[in-house]
Image (tube, grey):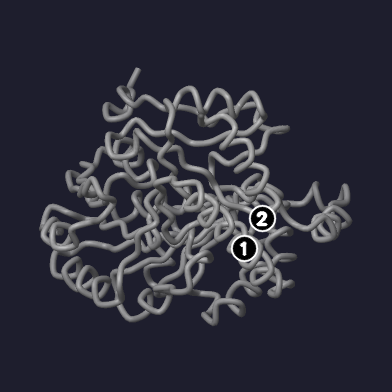
Amino acid sequence: MYVKECVKGIERIGGRQGRLGFMRLDMNENPEGLPRELVDEVKAELTPEFLATYPEPERFLGLLAEYLGVERANLCVTNGSDMAIRYIFEVFGRPGSSVLTVSPSFEMYRINCLIFGLTHKPVVYNADFTLDFEKVLGAITDEVSIVSVLNPNNPIGSVYTEEQFDRIARRAKEMGALVIVDEAYHYFYDRTFLKKAFEYDNVLLIRTFSKLFSAAAVRLGFIVGREELVHYIWNVRPTFDTNAVALKLGEKLLEHPELQERLTAIEREGREYLTASLEEHGYEFVSGNGNYVFIRTKTPISQVKARLEEKKILVKTYSQEMLAQYIRISTGSRAVMERFAAAFYEVDR
């Protein structure tokens, strides 16, 4: 029996199970979720007839086009931004080529390289959490078919300037490469490269509803770009990719544009409280431009993590050398951050 050779040796670690009932600060979700009244609006429309009908994404796409100020033809809805990445690799990943990312970065870029038989080409951060931009630029060579630009980057939270992005896009075009702009965390940062997806004919931008919009459970993402590039994505996408419940929740979120500002303000207040508290308690920490903060613990990481779990609080740890001395926590409202801080100071001693 034939098995695609490049997938045989892939080792996948499934998402952690049994997380309900915990304060979930380990996966950059909103710890408290959406307002109850908005969820109730969605639930009211989930009739038996609705659930028996195949998804119809056009209303969502129309609202999204208006929200972003683009045309419907510039959009493709996907089953989370994970699937957006996979579609882009499938369409634009030249056989035998490389995919350029920074490291550490979102793990699915490396995994998709393995799935599609591409070579992962990472440019590693410095030990002080800085990135040598010239190394990134120099790594865009003619064997690279895709360049990933996470802005802000997950997990570090660093960002690119507009000048830096322009240099990346132009260099990639010279080498015949596509640039993915991954803006999963842009809502926590006051800039976007959305316009670059139209200035350049080798740029696609992806976003997700999982982070600020607190809809990780339903898997909703999208791709934005020039019509020709987006059309290629639609050509490989299944007929019914994104489920109807996800689309309905997306519609409700877009019908309440004031919610973005509200959710952003809540997270910002909580993050500012936490960083001020950590500084007051003499902690070394790194707070970038996403909804997460790295904290260097004073006692062993494994001990802190275990003690927090006893208090029903989940945090993220890493094996990479530059991150191994830190826990990373997702930031949320001030109330959530106060609860975390009180527990953290108690166990890290």
Residue at x 33% of width, y 22% of height: 2
Q: Earlier in the sequence, mark 1 or mark 2?
A: 1
SS under mark 2? loop
**Which residue is nearer to you in this view: 313 or 348?**
348
- Determine the image quadrant of residue 115: top left
| Mark 1–mark 2 distance (CA, rounded to whole Å) | 7 Å
Does residue 234 appear in the picture of this structure?
Answer: no
Q: In this rendering, would 42 be left or right of 3? A: right
Q: Which residue is mark 1?
A: 269
Q: How many marks?
A: 2
Is 101 placed above or below 185 here?
above
Rendered location of residue 7, percent (x, y):
33, 28
- The reply to whether the C-beta atoms of the residues labelled 1 and 2 are less than 8 Å apart is yes
**Which residue is nearer to you in this view: 292 or 240?**
292
Rendered location of residue 81, percent (x, y):
49, 53
The amino acid type, in three-letter code, at marker 2 is Ser
Q: Which residue is mark 2?
A: 333
Mark identifier at residue 101: none
The amino acid type, in three-letter code, at marker 1 is Glu
Q: Quadrant location of the N terminus?
A: top left
Is 161 placed above or below 328 here?
below
Rendered location of residue 293, percent (x, y):
47, 49
Residue at x 48% of width, y 48% of height: 83
**Which residue is nearer to you in this view: 132 or 306?**
306
Rendered location of residue 55, percent (x, y):
69, 55
- Crowd around label 2: few <14 · some 14–19 · many ≥20 (10 Å): many
Is 77 placed above or below 12 here?
below
SS under mark 1? helix
Residue at x 59% of width, y 29% of height: 308
Does residue 18 appear in the picture of this structure?
Answer: yes
